[in-house]
Amino acid sequence: MKTFISNNYQWIKNFYLKHERLLMSVMLVSGFLFDFVAFVNIDIAFKFTVLVFYWLLSGGLIAFMQAYDGGKISLRFQYVRLFAPLVLQFTFGGLLNISLIFYWFSGAFSVSWPFIIIIALLLYFNDTFRHYFSKPLVQVSVYFFITFSLFSLILPFWFASLNVWLFLLAGGLSLIIFLFYIYGLTFLNHQTLAQKFSIFISIIFITIAMNLMYFTNIIPPIPLAMREAGLYHSIDSTGLNYVMTGELESFWQNIQSAIFGQTVHIFGNEKIYLYNAIFAPTNLQTTIVHHWQYYDKEKGKWSDMGNLKFIINGGLQSGYRGYSWQSNLEAGKWRVYVENMQGKVLAKVNFVVEKSVFPVQLQQVVR
């Protein structure tokens, strides 16, 4: 009987190792997509409950694997140890989903390309360095990054505030928790003890990098998230809806707009409107600024064309809608920074203005 169990385990293990590359990638993407698709219309509080469960499960799985590899857990749990990395990949995928959405992914189609690049990079590094994934240094470093990202998202929701001190508090809490977590792991596996110094250096580096990206506007002012942005020729408010007119674009023109920015054709001196929908936590009220800029070829620099402000109130799943406009736009390159009152950039919308001698063909859009 024991021989049968041993042979059966060896067959499963060989199958797992043979297809490890595919399984690890599939579980990472599955975790991401499951959370992204399944929780789209679910209350944000329930989402956070699930994410906290993922976070606790991830920490428990890392501790279990280190304890098993360190000889602290019976061999009877060999099946659990064999498939634990797959479950960890799934939970990491679900947790990274939130980081991608609120740090890098914008709902505005013109700036949504980072989503594809980041997924590709995750798959590449997951595939290339999968043999290093069992090392405590890699596991704990990824787990710390996820923890920092999760805390810096949850705290603003909890306090209904975008105060910069909440981001600093998220980093401080993450460091304190991991001081105890890493200390506990050192008792489970001698390899963790040997890498303790390297792990501490890694999480300090991640902390410094996150703060640098936050304070240099490389990452947006979380937890605000752009749901949609677009340029239109007219906007009218009719009750709960906005009725807008925009230019007709083919599929390939949409692709070009996403990569290079939208091209807006102006007939006469008509206005151009920038519409956006921004998600914000419930009970949060903040001011959004549209910072319009025009590239002056003669001066060779961007010229400020005005800061237009409006207040948003959080809580709408589809995002709070608002817009600003400019008239008498010069032909050439334009951009609009969507910022908060502290000047932190939520999104950037690039577009080109071209003068038209004929009226532009438009289509109506209702939001």
Image (tube, grey):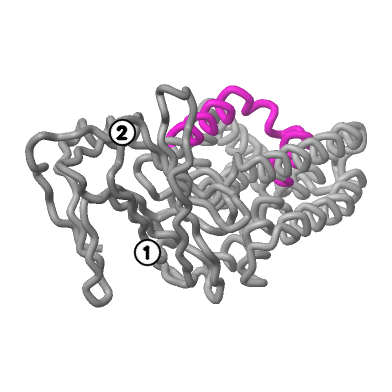
Say what amino acid the circle numbered 2 marks: Val
Say what amino acid the circle numbered 1 marks: Arg
**Residue drawn where x is 53% and y is 58% of the image:** 224
Where does the magenta region start and end?
116-144
Estimate the spatial distance between the alpha carbons at disc 1 and disc 2, rounded to whole Å.
23 Å
| Front residue of 173 and 57 | 173
Q: Nearer the viewer, mark 1 or mark 2?
A: 2
In magenta stretch: residue 202:
no
Which quadrant of the structure image shows residue 138? top right
From the image, tell me which residue sits under label 1.
321
Which quadrant of the structure image shows residue 153? bottom right
Asked if residue 49 shows in the view, the reply is yes
Q: Quadrant of the N terminus?
A: top right
Residue 130, given in percent of the width and then of the height, sits at: 62, 28
Q: Quadrant of the C terminus?
A: bottom left
Residue 139, given in percent of the width and then of the height, sits at: 72, 39
| Front residue of 112 and 98 | 112
Crowding at dot 1, Cα within 10 Å, few <14 / some 14-19 / many 20+, comes out as many
**Depicted 119 relative to depicted 188: above or below:** above
Crowding at dot 2, Cα within 10 Å, few <14 / some 14-19 / many 20+, comes out as some
Which quadrant of the structure image shows residue 200? top right
Residue 296, given in percent of the width and then of the height, sits at: 42, 29
Q: Is residue 270 left or right of residue 304?
A: left
From the image, tell me which residue sits under label 2.
352
Residue 69, given in percent of the width and then of the height, sits at: 80, 38
